Image (spheres, rainbow, N blue to C red):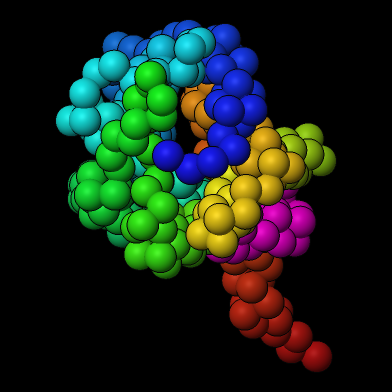
């Protein structure tokens, strides 16, 4: 048992109510989103497939929050055994990074639909999105697999802790892995998402066939996507690694720890908000942008056609 953790455990015990509320809203929101896709979507285009997988990932993520809330309920104690401890934390990380990967897929798909509409129409098929979704699930499982090794139970007086990271002795091996998760599970999807968002904004701003309202909707959507990522994912990973840094030095920094716990609560909110962002606001956005850019290209094509026509012959 690490010393000086009583006050920190007491702080965690105050968070169980928030986690239960997140669980309820996330299950309702993502459950309804999945039902909507299955019951009402007749044509599953690539964006729908990625959004469905994002909702599925968020739903599984939300389910993993319920044992965590029970664990934090005072007095803090894990009573479900080592196997369920490992599985709960594994499911948490698989679906955390499944969410970041599918957000990147949705953003890249929207980028292709908006910036390269003819390529998207002729080359991008639902089959490709299904293959990509399978690859994203396998990638999320692969990078989360070491969690099954590091996660373990740790005695803490009369209670038992379910460590979501590693014991003190294994921290030197766990820290590089944690930085790897930050780079691959958070950083890489963010770079792809940011690139897609910036490219879409530039394309729409140059488009003369896009109305002001359409441009405004795109800007709101893009800003929301980037803001959510900056608010939920980056703080969690940054303060998580800072907390491990002080743990490895056997010098618990209470401010860093409490901030890290707050970011853990914030990162859970993404599963509550995604159904509104990706199933409602973004549903018709690629179509409207694509149509606007297609109108612009059609106008440009007509102008070039007129320029290439020979001038009327003057017999005089």
State the residue at coordinates (67%, 60%).
198
Classify residue 78 as left or right of residue 86.
right
Which residue is drawn at the image coordinates 73% and 42% (left, top)?
255
Look at the image and tell me whether residue 285 can be seen. no
From this view, report whether residue 171 is shown above or below residue 227. Answer: below
- Tell whether position 144 is magenta: no
Residue 95 is situated, as x and y percent measured from the top left of the image, at 36, 37
- Label count reads 0
Answer left or right for 15 relative to 167: right
Stretch of the chain drawn in magenta: 190-210
Q: How far from the left and from the top, in percent, is residue 276? A: 57, 22
The N terminus - image quarter = top left
Give whichever of 302, 177 is nearer the camera. Answer: 177
**Who is closer to the viewer here, 204 or 279?**
279
Q: Residue furthest bottom?
A: 316
83 over 75 or under it: above or below: below
Q: Report the side of 307 relative to 188 (left or right).
A: right
Look at the picture and state if 198 lies above or below 88: below
- Main SS of the magenta segment? helix
* The quarter of the displayed image where residue 122 is located: bottom left
> Does 204 appear in magenta?
yes
User: What residue do we see at 64% from left, 73% from top?
Assistant: 304
* Among the 4 quarters of the image, the one containing residue 98: top left
Q: Report if residue 257 is visible in the image.
A: yes
Examine the rendered structure and indicate whether residue 236 appears above or below residue 168. above
Instruction: Give the residue at the far left of this rendering.
Output: 83
The quarter of the rendered structure image containing the C terminus is bottom right
Position in image of residue 256 (x %, y %): 68, 46
Q: Residue 231, how many percent across, how many down?
A: 68, 41
Quick one: 296 or 263, which is closer to the camera? 263
């Amino acid at each position: 048992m690490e010393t000086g953790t009583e006050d920190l455990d007491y702080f965690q015990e105050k968070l169980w109510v928030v986690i239960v509320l997140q669980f309820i809203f996330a299950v309702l929101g993502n459950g309804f989103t999945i039902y909507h896709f299955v019951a009402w979507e007749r044509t599953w285009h690539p964006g729908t497939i990625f959004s469905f997988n994002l909702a599925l990932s968020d739903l599984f993520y939300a389910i993993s929050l319920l044992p965590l809330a029970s664990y934090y309920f005072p007095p803090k104690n894990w009573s479900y055994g080592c196997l369920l401890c490992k599985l709960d934390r594994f499911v948490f990380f698989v679906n955390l990074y499944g969410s970041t990967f599918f957000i990147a897929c949705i953003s890249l798909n929207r980028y292709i639909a908006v910036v390269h509409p003819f390529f998207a129409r002729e080359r991008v098929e639902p089959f490709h999105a299904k293959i990509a979704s399978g690859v994203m699930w396998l990638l999320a499982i692969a990078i989360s697999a070491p969690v099954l090794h590091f996660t373990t139970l740790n005695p803490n007086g009369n209670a038992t802790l379910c460590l979501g990271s590693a014991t003190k002795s294994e921290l030197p091996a766990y820290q590089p892995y944690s930085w790897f998760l930050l780079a691959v599970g958070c950083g890489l999807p963010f770079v792809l998402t940011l690139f897609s968002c910036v490219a879409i904004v530039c394309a729409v701003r140059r488009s003369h066939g896009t109305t002001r309202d359409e441009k405004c909707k795109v800007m709101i959507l893009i800003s929301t996507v980037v803001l959510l990522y900056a608010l939920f994912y980056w703080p969690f990973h940054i303060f998580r690694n800072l907390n491990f840094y002080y743990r490895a030095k056997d010098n618990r920094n209470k401010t860093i720890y409490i901030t890290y716990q707050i970011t853990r609560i914030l990162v859970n909110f993404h599963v509550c908000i995604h159904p509104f962002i990706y199933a409602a606001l973004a549903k018709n956005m690629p179509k409207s942008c694509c149509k606007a850019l297609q109108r612009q290209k059609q106008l440009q094509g007509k102008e070039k056609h007129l320029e290439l026509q020979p001038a009327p012959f003057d017999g005089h």
